[in-house]
Image (cartoon, helix red, strand yellow):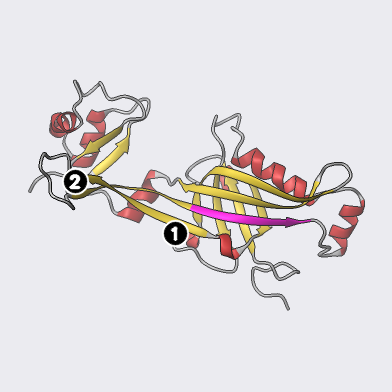
């Protein structure tokens, strides 16, 4: 009897599910793959951004927390068409169906290529079937693939990959509600650093964070903005904590 989350060769399996929206759900699921992976390559990285004090004459160690950067996950999928798992896969190989090549193209299609409807790559959820990740709902990791590297090990006489390793790096991307539940950063007593996007308003963000628009001028001053409308798209806007 095979162990839970293992293929016929005893290699651990992982569900890789692509979605068209950051708020993942059955209604926007695009594609689901179940792939063997190398457990030794599964790494999650968590990082806090610490900045040095800009005060003149600041002592060593005069640093402060700025923000928590998005978590990252790296994983290597092991694709091998030289292994015959069942009669169906044997028949498919006789008919010229190369699962390794198809899987690589699917990962690139959804994880790297820009989707026509959303004008951005698809979002992805990684869920190992034989272990749990200490991140995300259902112990999965959700985000967007930031890099994909294909290591070819064997090709057929038509140049199609039969055996390969696919190294992926995923950066965490969560909907706003999920981020608030995860971090608890809904208090005006905390420092917030928010990337300013097209259509964003410093005035509206200030009202959301502090519950009142009157603090928007303090935000402009903290970020050295000439006016509350002069924030540039892509800039990290600091919303400092309220003093009590």
For the record, the magenta segment spans: 73-80
Q: Residue 232's x, y, as percent?
A: 31, 24
- Which residue position holds label 1? 135
Q: Which mark is residue 188?
A: 2
Q: Nearer the viewer, residue 97 or 169?
A: 169
Give the vertical position of 46 relative to 221 (above or below).
Answer: below
- Mark 1 to mark 2: distance in Å? 25 Å
Would you call the spot at circle 1 few (<14 residues within 10 Å), some (14-19), or many (20 or more)? Answer: some
Quick check: can you spot residue 35? yes
Q: Which mark is residue 26?
A: none
Camera-nearest label, 1 or 2: 1
Q: Nearer the viewer, residue 171 or 229?
A: 171
Quarter residue 46 falls in: bottom left
Q: Residue 96's x, y, as percent?
A: 89, 48
Q: Residue 140's x, y, as percent?
A: 51, 58
| Residue drawn at (71%, 71%) of the image | 10
In this rendering, position of residue 9 left or right of residue 147:
right
Would you call the spot at circle 2 few (<14 residues within 10 Å), some (14-19), or many (20 or more)? Answer: some
In this rendering, position of residue 126 left or right of residue 236:
right
Q: Nearer the viewer, residue 113 or 53?
A: 53
Q: Residue furthest right?
A: 94
Q: Residue furthest left?
A: 244
Give the vertical position of 136 relative to 113 (above or below).
Answer: below
Give the vertical position of 85 relative to 121 (above or below).
Answer: below
| Residue drawn at (61%, 53%) of the image | 16
Q: Residue 62's x, y, as percent?
A: 16, 50
Q: Decide: marks 1, 2 in contact (CB < 8 A)?
A: no
């Amino acid at each position: 009897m095979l162990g839970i989350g293992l293929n016929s060769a005893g290699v651990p399996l992982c569900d890789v599910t692509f979605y068209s929206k950051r708020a993942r759900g059955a209604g926007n699921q695009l594609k689901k793959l179940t792939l063997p992976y190398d457990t030794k390559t599964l790494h999650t990285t968590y990082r806090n951004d610490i900045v040095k004090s800009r005060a003149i004459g600041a002592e060593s160690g005069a640093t402060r927390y700025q923000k928590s950067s998005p978590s990252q996950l790296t994983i290597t999928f092991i694709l091998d068409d030289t292994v015959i798992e069942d009669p169906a896969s044997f028949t498919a190989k006789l008919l010229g169906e190369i699962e390794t090549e198809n899987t690589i193209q699917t990962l690139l299609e959804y994880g790297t290529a820009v989707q026509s409807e959303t004008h951005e790559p698809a979002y992805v959820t990684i869920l190992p079937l034989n272990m749990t990740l200490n991140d995300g709902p259902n112990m999965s990791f959700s985000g967007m693939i930031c890099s994909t590297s294909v290591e070819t090990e064997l090709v057929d006489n038509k140049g199609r990959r039969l055996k390969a390793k696919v190294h992926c790096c995923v950066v965490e991307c969560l909907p706003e509600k999920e981020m608030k539940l995860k971090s608890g950063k809904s208090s005006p007593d905390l420092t917030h650093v928010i990337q300013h996007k097209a259509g964003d308003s410093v005035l509206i963000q200030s009202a959301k964070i502090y519950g009142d628009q009157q603090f928007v001028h303090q935000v402009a001053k903290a970020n050295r903005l000439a006016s509350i409308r002069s924030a540039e798209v892509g800039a990290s806007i600091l919303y400092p904590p309220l003093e009590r």
